[in-house]
Amino acid sequence: MVPITTLHYLVVAAALFVLGVIGVLIRRNVVIVLMSIELILNAVNLNLVAFSRMWGNLHGQVFAIFIIVDAAAEAAVGLGILIAFFRNKETVNVDEIDLLKW
Amino acid sequence: MNPGLNAALNSGMAPVATPWFFYALAGMAVVSALLVITLRNAVHAALALIVTLLSVASLYLMLYAPFVTGVQIVVYAGGIMVLFLFVIMLVNIERSSKEHRFNRIWPAGLAAACALLALFVSAFVKGKALFADRGMPLPESSNTQQIATMLYGEAGRMGQYTFAFEIASLLLLVAILGAVIMTKKKI
Amino acid sequence: MPNFIMSYLGSTVTPGEAGNQFWALIYVLIIFAGVSVAVIAMNWIERKALAHFQVRLGPMRVGPHGLLQPIADAVKLMLKEDIIPAEADQFVFWVAPLIGLLAAFTVYTVIPFGPSQAVSDMNIGILFMLGVSSLGVLGVVVAGWASNSHYPLIGALRSSAQMVSYEVAMGLAVVSAILMTSMNASGTGTLSMIGIVQAQQQQGVWFIFKFFPLGLLALVIFAIAMIAETNRAPFDLAEAESELTAGYHTEYSGLRWSLFMLSEYAAMIAVSSIAVTLWLGGWMRPFPNLLHAPAWDFIFSLFPGLTFLGLAAIAFIGTARMPSHSFFKIQCIGLAVFAALLGFIALLLLVAAVAGRSADTSLAARFNEGIGYVYWFVLKVAVFMYLFIWYRATWPRYRFDQLMKIGWKVMLPISLGVLVLTAIVGVIAS
Amino acid sequence: MSVYKDDQTSDASNREHSSLDRSHLDLDTPDKTYLDSNELIINMGPQHPATHGVLRVILKLDGEKVLGTECVIGYLHRGVEKIAENRTYTMFAPYVDRMDYVAAVSNGLGYCEAVEKLMNVEAPPRAKYIRVILTELQRIASHQIWLGTHALDIGAMTPLFYTFRDREEILKIFEKYCGARLTTHAFRIGGCQYETYAGFEKDVKNFLAFFAPKIDEYEALLTTNRIWVERTRNVGVISAADCVALGVTGPVLRASGVKWDLRKAQPYAAYAEFDFEIPTGTNGDTYDRYLVRMEEMRQSMRIIEQAVNGIPEGPIMGKVPKVIKPPVGEIYHSIEAPKGELGYFIVSDGSTQPYRLRVRPPSFVNLQALDIMVRGLLVADVVAVIGTIDIVLGEVDR
């Protein structure tokens, strides 16, 4: 059995990141787009924590905590915007959010 | 008590769990992440995302980062996801579940993501040597205290990240206000 | 004696810490079975106690004094037809009770029944407990949504809003207790559940009495928040029978409904355990700092045996008072056997207590010590569980806006104040 | 699934098929959907733990706030008034017990007195006293049921069992007196069928002694209970003017400050001879109604005490013919039932059967006030208000 190295974690994080990017790019539902952003942030966090272990210091973990804080703020504001938008347009599809194209 | 294992634990060298745990958790995380972006129903997607988050939290535990695990569970799984579920219930997804899941430019998006994946793979293949362990893994037992020291500082001395920490709290405050104002019918 | 048993008995840390997977597994099984039995017992006690509060007898038919009623109910619930509403989301409807159950049972891995009587001593124990128990709200939300019905949805929204908002006050109360752990020479606190109890041991005071009345206030806030957190009366709006029929589990029946009940009671025991660990000295016996003579140790070590002896005596009196009609013959025999069983356990414990006194390092002493830890912990938890029943019998139900008002406008400021004052007093004291 | 939009569309489509006219309720779908102003329409009942039987209330909610209600009644309609037209006056008497089945004695009293008034006969004094004693006992029993169920609706389980325990003593007296506990049919036209049994006075006095501390026990559980006060004070407020306009009577009216009690205003039976107070409230909220009813129980005890001490000797049946054939004419007679004014309007064509009999049930009239009382409150208050109005569906639907 191959021992688990930092690279293993990086591969997982890369997979999550790419999946998150795919979600952001191709899904129509804003809620799921926001969830995909959470996936991306998680992938980044996983990288940071893995690097923290690799370097043997805690800076990565502290950054991960900051990113979680950021994710909370992002989710609150993002969902707030979503609700405000849904109230006006009655849709949650990104490709119908085209008011600026007028 | 297994003396060998204990000694290994105390020295901080041995893995916390067997590789099988890693593969299981990583598989769970990736598969449920895949479900997040493919499932039609947003509640199902949210449940899948919760599984991803918890798997990633467990991976943090394997990386000797218990405090990040705790924060991940409390903030992400317990807080943010409840918020997501609330919003999903409030907005109409009955209709969206009958519509197309993907937008018109999805081939382009998929292609871009694949390019990104290729970039990652090439980076990992070429730079494999970069990711060797550089320092001694940190002991798990004082993880929280050390993070606290970095965030708040020790007696009489500001921590390395104290300022950033305060800024983060300000960010949260702004986010709370923003969310409240945004969702209010009449201000 | 097989080596692995001795390996545990010789250890002074939890199996998880020692990496002893075998004992960890045994612990998990014991705790799972123990919690399930405790839930069943709690079910019976609640019904009996509530009945006696309300000048009724409660269950009397199944077994002597209804002792087998919870088992009969469990069997009935399992055999019941499994109904999924046609418009419900089948998968989520299935998963929702499991989420609640998982959340309620996972927290038991870090609950310290003794200094080594826990599955694992996590560095982030209390954070883990709060986090995982807050996952229970997901089960509630999802259950209400999946039922595709109005009453469950309103119930789910109510209870999740309630759980989320009381978590804030609860967390702040917990933080003030954690702050107290850092008031030692080195100035470092701990989040570990075992570490918190050991901090109380070192400081020679249960945190309920520390910085009086700050510790007490924090406990009161926690005790109120935990009722709201577990959706019990007088904060049981989510299940407000008279308003929302049954709240989020209106559409549930049979096995899945019983899973909800199981997780609710398991969560009640879990939060009571947090309160006991944080403020009431966890596994410590009363007054270890004042009454520390070995003689006192011996006297307190007799308590578990005496408790069982008392229970056996009650059961015997019950047997004697059974009507002498032939109909009650089987019940009479059953109760007598039950009493004899309790008496046997009592005897065993008393023998262990006496034997453990003579030799300080023997197996009996270790065993006796462990029994003592678990006994005091469970006794303290039982007090909280009784309070849950008492509240339910006494108080009407709050309205939703009142509940929110109390949560945000009363509990939150008080808990913040307690936290700040604890910090200030701590700094002054050190 | 979305609660909001989905419900509105389904509701709009349902409404076309529904025979219910909800136009007065303004239950229209708004043109534009605003997330948190989305109305939710839910059905409370007829199978619901807190609707005291088979009341169905359609609630229009904004979140938890009640925008409007509509009561759908008739699930317990048995056509009592129509039955009366096909039964003789004597035969109909037991039917009235089935209207307000938790206050059967009061129903019987009202009916018997109405027919007596129509026939121009009067019950002898002893019969009147027996009637007063039993009716006031019934009032206490009815209020006990109200208290228990009302408290249960608000979430206090225990008072229910206490009140039912104590109500049992009253039912025992009824059972000893006439053999029935619930639908007693205790009185006959012209007086009482049965003479009191030996020890009746003692039983009643024992009950009074037994019950006095019990009221205090109920009050100890509720009156100063903070949660109870918060749940009831300023909930379901109705002004005296609204009460009068809607014809609301009974404790609901008195709690709004109107001192109107038929026992004082139009004394019937032997009520003119007793000394008692009419408790009134000031705010007209649920808490006041609670206090009024608690005080009424005490006043009922006072009346019973006076009646049982002063019960005269004599016959218990007035001079009524075997076949009851009232003269042609019509009569309206009302009494103060536990829930309010219980009126009987009887039209006689001179035959042995009423030509028309109309009942004015207090619950039915009081239920009209529900909408006024709950608008702007929360769902939880709806059950509190239904409880405080003290309806019995048997009487509402008849």
Image (cartoon, rainbow, N blue to C red):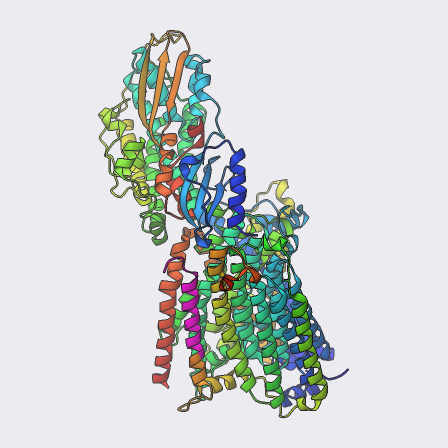
Decide whether residue A24 is among the magenta residues. Answer: no
Q: Would you say residue D203 is visible in this rendering?
A: no
Is residue B181 rendered magenta in the image? yes
Q: Is residue D85 above or below residue B182?
A: above
Question: Looking at the image, is C245 positioned above or below residue C157?
Answer: above
Q: Is residue C176 left or right of residue C97?
A: left
Q: Is residue C20 above or below residue D182?
A: below
Rendered location of residue C94, percent (x, y): 64, 55
Report the side of C326 relative to C181 (left or right). Answer: right
Residue D137 in the image, given as x and y percentages of width and height = 35, 31
Q: Quadrant of the N terminus of chain A?
A: bottom right
- Residue at the spot 63% in from the left edge and 69% down from the top edge: B52
Residue that extends furthest to the front in the rendered view of this protein: A102
Which residue is more in the foreground, B65 or C355? B65
Horizontally, residue B126 falls left or right of residue C398, namely: right
The answer to whether any part of residue D294 appears in the image is yes
Which of the 4 image quarters holds residue C120? bottom right
Res D95 quadrant in image: top left
Q: Residue at x 46, y 17 (%)?
A: D83
Q: Position of residue C341 (x, y in %)?
A: 63, 59
Range shown magenta: B168-187
Q: Nearer the viewer, residue C301 or C398?
A: C398
When asked about the image quadrant of residue D69, the answer is top left
